[in-house]
Amino acid sequence: MLMEFLEKAVTMGCDSIEIEYKDYKEWVTAFWDCVGVGIACLDSGEVKPVFKEMDDLKKRKYVILGGASYRLVFSRYKSFGEWTYRIKMKIDRTRAAGVHRYSRRA
């Protein structure tokens, strides 16, 4: 489900998403700089798989969205006493071009 939110955000031209608890629900907002658009609202039962998927993605850090490789940067901060989770999507041009930063040259 989280990958669908990331895909939707990239399709809309956004560079990050936030998941914020408000009014007994988790709200997913896609951002382009400081402009945000709501893309989903999840009940408490729906949000557990999203956080599980987020934990799995933290280990991978790279995903393919819309045919391009993106590096994911995870952060969280407190907003009005509740944790807000932010996933920043940065296009990885080195992976798209087939260049690996850590490969050795002969």
Image (cartoon, helix red, strand yellow):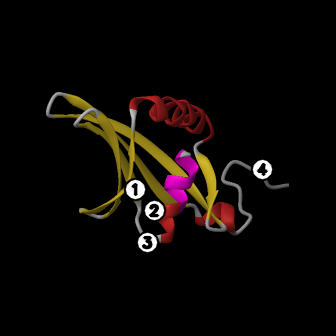
Magenta stretch holds residue 5 = yes
Mark 3 — residue? 13
Instruction: Please name whichever residue, 51 or 97, is drawn nearer the observer in this view of the structure.
Output: 51
Mark 3 nearby-residue class (10 Å; few <14, some 14–19, many ≥20): few
Residue at 50% from the left image edge and 62% from the top image edge: 8
Secondary structure, mark 4, is loop
Secondary structure, mark 2, is helix
Mark 1 nearby-residue class (10 Å; few <14, some 14–19, many ≥20): many
The residue type indicated by label 3 comes to Gly
Segment colored magenta: 2-7
Magenta stretch holds residue 46 = no
Tell me the number on the disc at residue 16. 1
The residue type indicated by label 2 comes to Ala
Mark 2 vs mark 4: give the one in front.
Answer: 2
Instruction: Report, in whole angstroms, how far the alpha carbon at label 1 lies from the one at label 3.
Output: 10 Å
Mark 4 — residue? 104
Tell me the number on the disc at residue 82. none
Where residue 41 appears, as percent x and y from the top left, is: 37, 47
Left/right placement of residue 66 relative to residue 38 reads right
